[in-house]
Amino acid sequence: MLNPVSLEPVSGSDDDLCDALATAQLPTEDIHEAGRTFFKARSDGVEVIGFSGIEQCASDFLLRSVVVLSGHRGRGFGKAIVEQTLRGLDRNGDVYLATTTAAPFFSTIGFSEVPRESVPPAVLDTRQLSSICPSSATIMKLQRPPT
Ligand SMILES: CC(C)(COP(=O)(O)OP(=O)(O)OC[C@H]1O[C@@H](n2cnc3c(N)ncnc32)[C@H](O)[C@@H]1OP(=O)(O)O)[C@@H](O)C(=O)NCCC(=O)NCCS
């Protein structure tokens, strides 16, 4: 059985976070800026297996910086990291992300592609969506069941 995944907050200047993002070719340009929260994920409370991040956008959120270290992929850790990251969020806010390569992975977790025109201005104004990610990036929104 897969070991449980736990998250601990880390700052945007965490060396391991920067290395993991750079190695996975994910953006690092803005990780030191305010308004972002990053997490280091450990398997069974010990081994570091990945990272994730959340950026507050008015009342909504941008999920970002999701990475599983290369030796640990394909074992459910990515899904567990995303699910744990989402668990801590205010359920009144919507969750968006932008990806150039991982849309099929995020669709297994309940995200689906949305048109740029439907995305709130505060999300579009993040550095990720306004300048770092190419305009061809897929924007996805977490589809939640009605409560
Ligand atoms: C994308 C990434 C986080 C996935 O992590 P992972 O631990 O390998 O994913 P999991 O094992 O949790 O996979 C969960 C599900 O997604 C599917 N999946 C994972 N990667 C996939 C891919 N590239 N294409 C299609 N499906 C994929 C798995 O088959 C699994 O499906 P299931 O639940 O039906 O069995 C990892 O490959 C990674 O770090 N990539 C580099 C960084 C990156 O692209 N991050 C996204 C930035 S926006």
Image (cartoon, rainbow, N blue to C red):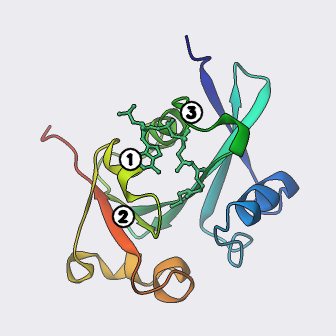
Residue plotted at (71% across, 78% down) = 29
Image x and y of residue 125, in percent = 44, 84
List the single residue furthest toward the right: 15
Disc 3 Cβ-to-ligand 1 distance below 8 Å = yes
Instruction: Mark 2 and mark 1 in contact? Answer it, CB < 8 Å.
Output: yes
Which of pointers 3 and 2 indicates the residue nearer the eye?
3
Q: Nearer the viewer, residue 61 or 59?
A: 61
CB at mark 2 closer than 8 A to ligand 1? no
Mark toward the start of the polypeptide (2 vs 1) = 2
- Counting labels gives 3
Q: Quadrant of residue 25?
A: bottom right
Looking at the rendering, in which quadrant would you find the N terminus?
A: top right
Give the residue at x 49% y 42%.
82
| Above-or-below relation of 47 to 88 | above
Left or right of 19 in this view: 127: left
Judging by the rendered image, the residue that carries numbered circle 2 is 59
Q: On the rendered image, what quadrant is the C terminus found in?
A: top left
Give the residue pinned by disc 1. Answer: 90
Q: Does the CB distance between marks 1 and 3 fall below 8 Å? A: no
Question: In the image as oriented, which residue stretches furthest toward the top?
Answer: 1
User: Where is residue 41 drawn, in percent x and y?
Assistant: 68, 37
